[in-house]
Image (cartoon, rainbow, N blue to C red):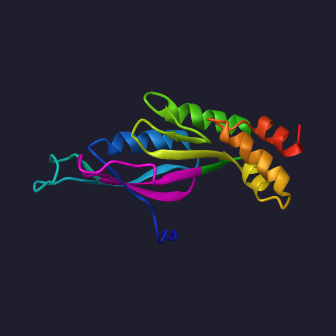
Amino acid sequence: MAKVQKISPFLWFDNNAEEAVKFYTSIFGNSKIGKVMRNGDNGPGPKGSVLVMDFELEGQQFNALNGGPMYKFTEAISFMVLCEEQKEVDRLWSKLTGNGGKEVQCGWLKDKFGLSWQIVPKVFMEMVADKDSAKVGRVMAAMMQMVKFDIKKLQAAYDGK
């Protein structure tokens, strides 16, 4: 029996949870759609429409709810994705900003559903954890000038070039 993740994000969508789940599971590896709970005769939505969907992205469990228009996503919550290389940063950035998504700054973006993401190269996290404050300062200054992360520019800043 698979272990159930004790804490998982529960995402509130207006009425497009199914579209969002299909979008996210098409972008990330090790992803799948799980249980789909549909509205019955007593609603709250139209009979047969999706109420809640369970899904996984990169092996992490999530839930999506068609809860109506009362609540919207804000930048106060975002999902950080650690990327191994620039190619992965570029691919995820392109997919998540496409078709109505929005670039923000410093590796942040909003997808077409209004959900905020941080697409971050793992090497950036290693650089800013360095004990050399001068290196960290240069990397942070370079990052503040970026919209999408550029690993070559971060590395040049780290190396003092």
Q: Residue at x 10, y 56 (%)?
A: 42
Q: How many marks?
A: 0
Q: Which residues are magenta?
A: 52-80
Residue located farthest toward the top when viewing the structure as drawn: 99
Q: Position of residue 50 (x, y in %)?
A: 26, 48
Q: Nearer the viewer, residue 147 or 64?
A: 147
* Nearer to us in this view, 71 or 17: 71
111 sits left or right of 86 in the view: left
Tell me the residue at 78%/50% (across/down): 137
Q: Quadrant of the C terminus?
A: top right
Residue in view at x 53 percent, y 46 percent: 117
Task: Tell me, yes or no, whether the highlighted magenta stretch contains residue 57.
Answer: yes
Residue 95 sits in which quadrant?
Answer: top right
132 lies left or right of 86: right
Report x, y in % for residue 68.
Answer: 23, 48
- Residue 117 shown left or right of residue 9 in the figure: right
Is 1 contained in the magenta span? no
Residue 27 lies, with reference to residue 53, above or below; the image says: above
Where is residue 127 shown, x and y percent of the image?
79, 52
User: Residue at the spot x=79%, y=45% of the render?
Assistant: 138
Q: Locate residue 145: give its quadrant.
A: top right
Q: Residue 123 versus residue 146: which sits nearer the camera?
A: 146
User: Is any atom of residue 57 visible in this view?
Assistant: no
Q: Is residue 140 above or below residue 5?
A: above
